[in-house]
Image (cartoon, rainbow, N blue to C red):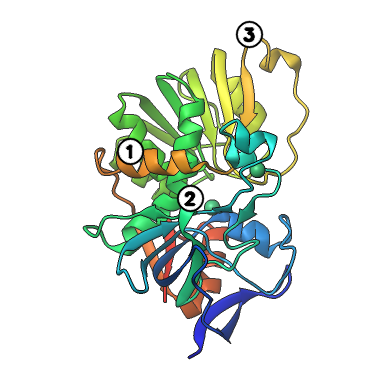
Amino acid sequence: MGVRAMVLDAPGRPLRAAELDRPLAGDGRLLIRVEACGVCRTDLHLLDGEIEVASPPRVLGHQIVGVVEGSGERVGVPWLGWTCGECRFCLRGRENLCERALFTGRDIDGGFAEWTAADERFCFPVPDGQPAVQVAPLLCAGLIGHRALRMAGDAERLGLYGFGAAAHIVCQVALWEGRRVFAFTRPGDVEAQSLACALGAEWAGDAAGPAPEPLDAALLFAPVGQHVPAALAAVEPGGTVVCAGIHMSDIPSFPYELLWGERTVRSVANLTRADGQEFLALAPQVPVHTHVTTYPLERANEALSDLRDGRLTGAAVVEP
Ligand SMILES: [Zn+2]
Ligand SMILES: [Zn+2]
């Protein structure tokens, strides 16, 4: 029986609708009927060749919610698909940095398909209560956003640069933790700004302009290098600027004065399984409500171009 899927053949080309063989389960791999798969900015970087897909054709998609064939159990499949367990990073509890890691939807076929297979050790249990399309964005946007938020320490005044899938989730968690949120969007992105305010951000405005008041930390989700000096200028001494994306345009040079005062610039890479367990337990307590735009599987290219052009608010999700 053929499996409908959207595959990447080469960078710069739209995904191609294909019929694939059903993936093989067994030997620790679960066969999963995909209910929903979130679309991530990383998928655009893969599509554009900014991150290499080593052996195409490849089924993209790494925010998968589906049902395990046989057991009927509902699981989530994240970006981290496999780690070696023995390199110096794995041994120190930093499997997000594993030297031989394999990533879902880059090195392993992902969730833009009716069926997928995943290493059960890297799947998370997902409760039945919520619709799959609502849960899917938690698996990367939510997880990476949460890891980035932890890097901000106890910052009270939090700037979010780029208010898409990740930021709209982080915003809810940060407010629940008692922080104050300031949302910085593309110039004139009224929809993203009004979503931010509806979720409880106390200010929303253009990322190109100044912050309304000094910040304690800034999380950068937009892949725009110019935001780094802008965010450094916005944070107070001791503040942290966290770059949460996997790829970013070059950071322009800036005067040392912007870093002076024990400000920190750092990145966040991938996730650990502990991040996933922690965040998926936290999300229902907040509770996090995701705002999603859904697309049928065959229209995955449209979802990607809407994400690229900022035509959607919140998160994009494809449904087989
Ligand atoms: Zn992602
Ligand atoms: Zn390793």
| Residue assigned mark 2 | 140
Q: Residue furthest left?
A: 129
Asked if the beta carbon under badge 2 is closer than 8 A to the nearest atom of ligand 1, the reply is yes
Q: Give the side of residue 191 with respect to residue 10, left or right.
A: left
How far apart are the two marked residues, 1 and 3, measured between alpha carbons? 30 Å
| Three-letter code, disc 2 | Cys
Q: Residues within 10 Å of mark 3 (few under 14, many from 20)?
A: few
Labels 2, 3: front one? 2
Rendering coords of residue 113 (x, y %): 49, 75
As shown in the figure, which amino acid type bears the numbered disc 1?
A: Gln
Q: Quadrant of the rendered structure where residue 295 is? A: bottom left
> Which mark sits nearer the N-terminus, 1 or 2?
2
Nearer the N terminus, badge 1 or badge 3? 1
Q: From this viewpoint, is residue 86 visible?
A: yes
Q: Position of residue 31 (x, y in %)?
A: 45, 71
Q: Is residue 85 left or right of residue 202?
A: right
Q: Is residue 318 above or below residue 197?
A: below
* Foreground of the two, 14 or 229: 14
Q: Position of residue 222 (x, y in %)?
A: 57, 44
The disc, 2 or 3, on the residue closer to the chain's N-terminal end is: 2
Q: Are marks 1 and 2 in contact (CB under 8 Å)?
A: no
Q: Nearer the viewer, residue 109 or 292?
A: 109
